[in-house]
Image: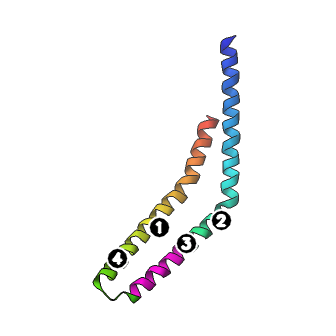
Amino acid sequence: MFNINLLAANDGLDGSLAQIVEKLKGLMDSFWVYIIIALAAVVVIWGAYIGIKIAIAHRNEEKINARDMVKNLIIGIVIIFVVAMGAPLLINGLSAWVGA
């Protein structure tokens, strides 16, 4: 009798997790375009700010700081790209894991 209850509880948890994954997929699908637009806007604005900093830099220290900011911007863009590509894969993997 205990095993039957344990199996029933396990099926309930799998069903709940499947519902959560489906809701996450729907949420990502509905907001994905807006997330990409917002991230692109931040990158463009920050890139313009860094460009202005480089253009008005007169001393070597300011130029070095501006170059470091460019490096940090590129690293940030790479991280954003990896997260943007990895999040749907993670959700699909979770969905496949629940479905298995």
Which residue is more in the foreground, 65 or 43? 65
Rendered image: mark on residue 65: 4
Which residue is more in the foreground, 30 or 70? 70
Q: In front of the other: label 4 or label 2?
A: 4
Query: Which residue in the protein does label 1 denote?
Result: 77
Position of 99 with respect to 89 (left or right) is right
Residue extending farthest to the left is 60
Q: Separation of disc 3 and disc 2 at Cα?
A: 14 Å
Query: Which residue in the protein does label 2 denote?
Result: 33
Residue type (three-letter) at the residue carrying disc 2 = Val
Q: What stretch of residues is rendered in magenta?
A: 43-55
Residue type (three-letter) at the residue carrying disc 3 = Val
Disc 1 packing (10 Å; few <14; some 14–19; many ≥20): some
Check the image and report above or below for 50 versus 6: below
SS state under label 1: helix
**Of label 2 and label 1, which has the lower sequence position?**
2
